[in-house]
Amino acid sequence: MMKVTNYFNGSYSPHSLRHTKAIHLYNNGTPLLYIKEFLGHSTVSSTEIYATPDSKKQREEILRNSESIKTKNKYSNNKKDDLDNWLKNNMK
């Protein structure tokens, strides 16, 4: 007989499974209006609770959109090295 591992420890409700499916759809690019229809919500404001990006996707978007941002180099490399050494020696 084959041993089956129980991956579903704990208590799950139909709502938690529905919520999880909606979040997965959103995080994989499904427009919120489509998710609204899928869930049967009457307004998109009811569906907005699912519009919370996962941390990986959030990081990817921030990095992708910040590539064009250029910052002015205010300090020389020597000043940066001095500060780095000071922090290493004084923040123990």
Image: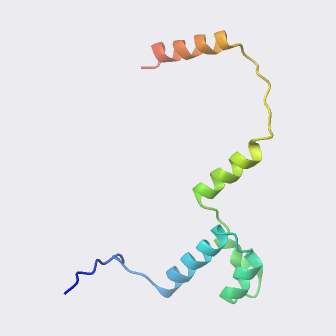
Residue at left offset 46%, top offset 13%: 89
Where residue 15 appears, as percent x and y from the top left, is 53, 84
- Which quarter shows the C terminus? top left
Identify whether 41 is placed above or below 30: below
Residue at the outermost front position = 1
Residue at the outermost left position = 1
Q: Quadrant of residue 12?
A: bottom left
Residue at left offset 31%, top offset 78%: 6
Name the side, left or right, on which 14 lies relative to 61: left
Identify whether 88 is placed above or below 15: above
Where residue 82 appears, as percent x and y from the top left, is 59, 10
- Which quarter shows the N terminus? bottom left
Identify whether 42 is placed above or below 21: below
Where residue 74 appears, as percent x and y from the top left, is 76, 19
Which of the pair 16/29 is nearer the observer?
Answer: 29
**What sort of colour scheme is used for the picture?**
rainbow
Residue at left offset 68%, top offset 87%: 38
Q: Quadrant of residue 42?
A: bottom right
Where residue 28 appears, as percent x and y from the top left, is 64, 69
Name the side, left or right, on which 3 lies relative to 44: left
Which of the pair 78/18 is nearer the observer?
Answer: 78
How many marks overall? 0
Name the side, left or right, on which 88 lies relative to 51: left
Which of the pair 80/47 is nearer the observer?
Answer: 80
Residue at left offset 57%, top offset 78%: 21
